[in-house]
Image (cartoon, helix red, strand yellow):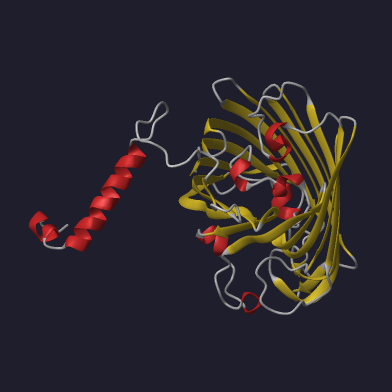
Amino acid sequence: MPPFKNLCSNRPKLLLQATLFVFCSFLIGIAPGKVNAQSVNKSRVGKGVQFVAADTSFSLRLNARVQTLYMGVQDLQEDSYSDRFLVRRARLKMEGFAYHPNLEYKIELGLSNSDIGGGISREFNNTANIILDAVLRWQFAPNFEVWFGQTKLPGNRERVISSQKLQFVDRSLLNSSYNIDRDAGVQLHHTFSAGNVVFREMLALSMGEGRNIAVDNRGGYEYTGRVEVLPFGEFTADGDYFGADLAREKTPKLSVGVSYDYNDRASRQGGQLGSFFDQERTLKAFFADAMFKYRGFSAMAEYADKESVGTPVVETNEFGSVTRAFQTGTGFNIQAGYVFKNNYEIAGRYTSINAELLTQRDDLRQYTLGLSKYIAGHTVKVQSDISLLRAEEINNELMYRFQVEIGF
């Protein structure tokens, strides 16, 4: 740090440091209760910074968030321990409408290494994989929307739930093994009601190779369909798509969904994720899930079945062992938790994975216990969990995680 007199002689640097000091003092001074400074608009935590044009021709809502994670893994076979601190996610999101409220847009960027890694290949034009969502949504008729661009496919519920709004530190092994993730294409969404029962249907046609692909389609297209039934009506604040019953539903709420996905001649290990292979396989995936919430209690269950047409094996070694293959098999996940009135939650999760091949996650069982404190809903929270992983009935590892999420 240079002497103070040198700072005074360097006005631009002094101005920058003073600005940073004021900004940091503002952040440190934030606390629950009344704030003396006036707000420039009616934004509040979790709703971002919002703007609407004077002629109402467009709107913009800006959100940012960061997840900072500590993770330690104790290998019970080798009696060793490894750990690390990392920025698990850092996201910037912009959404609103353009020209008309029925024409909406969403742009979400990933800024951490975990978000943008894996882009150094020909398929990504050797660039960082920054764009997560870039999608237009047009409500062209009552209860009908068409989406165009890159976003999540209507697959398993846990994947569609935002990583900001999870009940645990991260998603389950079922999701990381079998989800169909983000893709570029077009989707049609429809909602209707019959009395108190709500029905939703979603159809998607996409490229089948994941996000930010910079080369021509290598195989066929992907076709995805999903149907949801909400027999007791809609959840409060779209509560069927965030973890934990933070809304403390006054009446029981249930959502049941099924999805089917057909990825014609897929070229990546998991369809939208994993390594690119020279060979192609048609992948078929089926998902069934349910979400229930009532007075602070929540429960979610999912089943996944992913298979290939023909053998998923791509490569074997000289001994005949499989070294490269498409990821196929079945999985089951169930989790439940209760949010106390002081906004602490205790939750438990059980996940089983039965992979088709020994080179993948074969016969895994994971047991997880989580503790969360919701300071400002899912926008500002502290979460921790501990997981026991068992493979073939042998205790393999204990994983400890502690994560802080903050955003606006």
The residue that appears at 28% across and 52% down in the rendered structure is 19
| Residue 386, percent from left and from top | 58, 37
Kindly give the residue lying farthest to the left in the view shown: 5
Query: Is 134 rendered above or below residue 339?
Result: below
The residue nearer to you, when weighing 187 against 317, is 187
The residue that appears at 77% across and 76% down in the rendered structure is 217
| Residue 336, percent from left and from top | 70, 30
Residue 361 visible in this rendered orientation of the protein: no
The residue that appears at 55% across and 59% down in the rendered structure is 110
Give the total number of marks visible in the rendering: 0
Residue 368 visible in this rendered orientation of the protein: yes
| Residue 78, percent from left and from top | 56, 49
- Residue 220 location, quadrant: bottom right
| Residue 82, percent from left and from top | 49, 50
Query: Is 285 rendered above or below residue 76?
Result: below
227 left or right of 75 in image:
right
Kindly give the residue lying farthest to the front in the view shown: 55
The residue nearer to you, when weighing 316 against 164, is 164
- Residue 241 location, quadrant: top right
- In which quadrant will I find the N terminus? bottom left
